[in-house]
Amino acid sequence: MDFKLDVVEETGKVQAILQGEIDAYTAPVLREQLDGISISEGTQVELNFSNVNYMDSTGLSVIVAFYKSVVANGGDIVLTCLSERLKRLFDITGLTDIMNIEVRKVISNNERI
Amino acid sequence: MDELLDRAPCGFLSMTEDGTITLVNQTLVELLDYKRENLVGEHINLILTSPSCLFVQLYLLPLIALEGHVEELYITLKTKNGGEIPILINASKKNVIENNNIKCILIPIRQRNKYENELLIAKKDAEAALKAKHDAIEELRVTLETLESQTEELLRLNEQNQQFKIETKRELELARKIQQTSLTSPIQNKDIEMETFYKASKDLSGDIYGIYQLDSTRFGIILLDVMGHGISSALITMSLHALFHRLIREDGLTVEKVMKGLDNHLHELFQNNEEARHYCTAIFLLVDTDKQQIDYINAGHPSALWQDANGTQFELHSTTPPLGLFKNVRFESQTLLYKNSGRLLLYTDGVDPLGTEYLHPFLMENASLSLPAFKKKMLQTLSNCQIDNSKSDDQCFIIIDIK
């Protein structure tokens, strides 16, 4: 199962782009890579899920642990581009009310060129 | 000198017993690059290398004096320019025609030396090749021995693995039985009826439930799903099971106390090991058939569904995050008051691929089915649902008819 994390760090901003499947096999890799991101007071973190097609409860626990770590260090975190399926996972577990989550933007037909 | 001897294809010389050259043929003169007059009258040492001088003086001449002849002795001539020519010499003073002089035939063996050297080199090469072959054979023998030993080791390890596999399977089977034995039996009485389904995606499940009759009209029903599945999740389910088994029987039972107790337990369990942290989703219902009231807390669990006799549906959706994730969560129970009899469906997310959007109409369309028939139909629907094996999850559902 393939998984990749690309991290772009600028002053005060971190964009982490997740790619692949996040499950019991890949979650430890994700945890290790996320632990390597340095967060300080006011750091804006974006976790981009646009290329994540599957995530299970193990993956969810890693994301929540990272969320807690960012908040504990005074940063802000937003989860972006979640598919409806992934968003549902956060909805069911009630995490949508706690975490800042943006669903995947779908371009409507009217907006298509 | 005879013309033929003078031009013979070998050197010829005659010398006195003390080694003074008296006659030399043209072939030898040319071979040594001298003029004939420079050789005749000179001692043979003039045309010998130093070692050959010694050899001639100490061995060749005494031997001729004793035996009268020598054959195929190897000496080295020295040319005028200092060049060396290996030769074989035959010498004799027998059959003397003119006097007691020694007659010598000298045959250059430069080519033979070259061939012999080549033969020696070839012999060395052959010996080296033979040695390399023996070394290679030895290496192969050692490799073969190693391979045989490794094969034996692999077979032994394989046997060990097989044994380990058999023992692990036996242990897991026993653990699975223990886990299933811990599940409480569905309650069947005049007020309430139940059917349950419990299936692990692997040997052991991360799901667990408990059904308790607290008194004549009150029932506690809890369903938990620990993240992940397999042995690690199952261990936590058993620890939670022991706890809710106790909490539900405590005096002054409230839904909040049970959920808070389970939440605290998970935080305590993983307080020093964030990496091993497991959370669990849970729904706990306290059903009072006398008050026709269901108090519940849903902690991050898929919504339970209630449908009354009129077909009115209600979702018991999540009201707090999963247990063990966030500290200091305030647990506040929700209340569902019902007037008519109805059916409750609780399930874990292994059943969720059907989705609440599917389960709502499913519950509606099959309301007239008896509980066993309803369960059978749910199982048929689940088995038709194509779930990737690698992503399959533990499955558990509880169907409750409240009369």
Image (cartoon, rainbow, N blue to C red):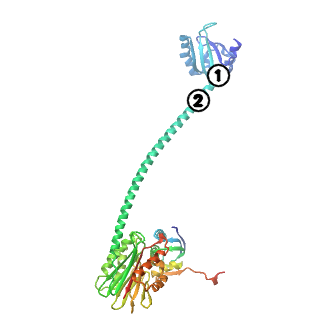
Residue ID at (44%, 79%): B378
* Quadrant housing the C terminus of chain A: bottom right
**Disc 1 target residue:** B79
Foreground pick, B386 / B35: B386
Secondary structure beneath label 2? helix
Residue ID at (46%, 43%): B141
Residue type, label 1: Thr
**Disc 2 target residue:** B117
The outermost residue toward the left is B251
Q: Earlier in the sequence, mark 1 or mark 2?
A: 1
Chain of the residue where label 1 is placed in the rendered structure: B
Locate residue A72: give its quadrant: bottom left
Foreground pick, B308 / B120: B308
Horizontal side of residue B172 vs B53, given as left or right: left
Residue ID at (38%, 85%): B401
* Residue A95 can be seen in this image: no
Q: Residues within 10 Å of mark 1 (few under 14, many from 20)?
A: some
Q: Position of residue B72 (x, y in %)?
A: 58, 18
Q: Position of residue A93 (x, y in %)?
A: 45, 80
- Mark 1–mark 2 CB contact (< 8 Å): no
Front disc: 1 or 2: 2
